[in-house]
Amino acid sequence: MRWWDIDAVLELEKDLFPEDAWSRGMFWSELAHARGPGATRRYLVAEDGGRLVGYAGLASSGDLADIQTIAVARDHQGTGLGSRLLTELLRAATDFDCAEVMLECRVDNVRAQKLYERFGFEAIGFRRGYYQPGNVDALVMRLTDPSTSVPGTPVQGTEING
């Protein structure tokens, strides 16, 4: 993901997460840590025919990584794109030498939970009222050793860029 992707990312963000969408500033802040020798972030976009159809981001600190976001356009859900984005984030975690990957997922997002479970993530707790303003709980999940997770299925016609 680059700065010129932010407008399209924000459109998708607001469609998929209307109550708790990230702001422009939040994406700019994350991208500020995604380049150069001291980079601690990896952000990706997926495009199909020049249209942004997904994005994902990971933050690392020491031997721990945290999946910040994964989003797939409604008309591309169920195509394997989420798996492919997650695979790329786990490769990034491995490149950052992270031994564990953490994430939070809305308790009502069963589809995402099943995706993470397929990759070996396990539920380890809850964060009450984590998603605001809806006051929705988050399920906290952890994956140990991201280098051994199952790779995703290639998605024809979809290009993923950092």
Image (spheres, rainbow, N blue to C red):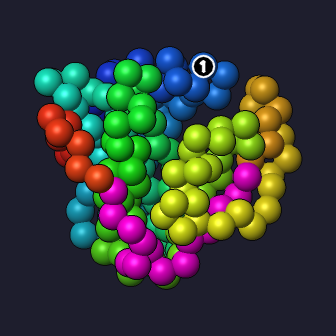
Q: Where is residue 11 in the image (x, y as percent from the top left)?
A: 41, 18
Q: Position of residue 127 (x, y in %)?
A: 80, 52
Q: Going by the image, does 96 lie left or right of 20? A: left
Which residue corresponds to the image point at 31% horizontal and 74% vertical from the top-left? 95
Q: Does 78 lie within the magenta span?
A: no
Along the viewing direction, whichever of 64 and 39 lies nearer the viewer: 64
Residue 94: image x %, image y %? 36, 75
> Is 142 positioned to the left or the right of 2 in the image?
right
Front-lying residue, 69 or 24:
69
Q: Is residue 34 visible?
A: no
- Secondary structure of the residue carrying numbered label 1: loop
Image quarter of residue 36:
bottom left
First to last magenta residue range: 139-152
Q: Tell me where residue 45 appears, x and y as whole percent.
A: 28, 39
| Residue drawn at the location 77% of the way across and 26% of the way down | 133
Looking at the rendered structure, the kind of residue marked 1 is Pro
User: Dot 1: few (<14), some (14–19), or many (≥20) neighbours within 10 Å?
Assistant: few
- The residue identified by callout 1 is 18
Kindly tell me whether residue 95 is visible in this rendering. yes
